[in-house]
Amino acid sequence: MKALSKSLAVMFFALFLVACSKVTPANFEKIQDDMTRQQVVDILGEPSDVSSASLLGFSGGTATWRDGKTVITVRFVNDKVVSKQIDTAATTSAY
């Protein structure tokens, strides 16, 4: 009986996490040029992948968030959003 209760608790927790995903088209639309990386993290949570580089006083990078078939990629220069892209199962859109 304890094993069944534990299994149900784990299943409900997993469903809760899926329902609370921040990687959504609605949140993608909230991201605007010149937002800081922290502002984007406040909207989407911590990214799945991050890459960065620095050259001649400029720093840049890309952060990617994934949830299921939805992938949001945001490019930063000097910690400010310069472009964003969303890929879903049905569409691809770049801004």
Image (cartoon, helix red, strand yellow):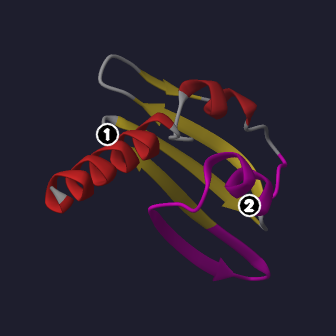
User: With 79 as the anchor, is 68 left or right in this view?
Assistant: left
Image: 72 above or below 78: above
In the foreground, 41 or 74 = 41
User: Looking at this rendering, what residue extends furthest in the top direction?
Assistant: 90
**Magenta stretch holds residue 77:** no
- Residue type at numbered disc 1: Gly
- Residue type at numbered disc 2: Arg
Question: Measured from the top left, where is residue 44 in percent x and y?
Answer: 62, 48
User: Looking at this rendering, what residue extends furthest in the front direction?
Assistant: 1
- Which residue matches tag 2? 37
Compare marks 1 and 2 and give the one earlier in the sequence. Answer: 2
Question: Measured from the top left, where is residue 28 in percent x and y?
Answer: 62, 33
User: With 90 as the anchor, is 41 left or right in this view?
Assistant: right
Question: Residue 68 — which label?
Answer: 1
Q: Which residues are magenta?
A: 34-60
Residue drawn at point x = 34 percent, y = 48 percent? 14
**Magenta stretch holds residue 35:** yes
Residue drawn at point x = 37 percent, y = 27 percent? 88
Would you say the residues marked 1 and 2 are in contact, meaning their CB atoms lie under 8 Å apart? Answer: no
Quadrant (top left/top right/bottom left/bottom right) for the C terminus: top right
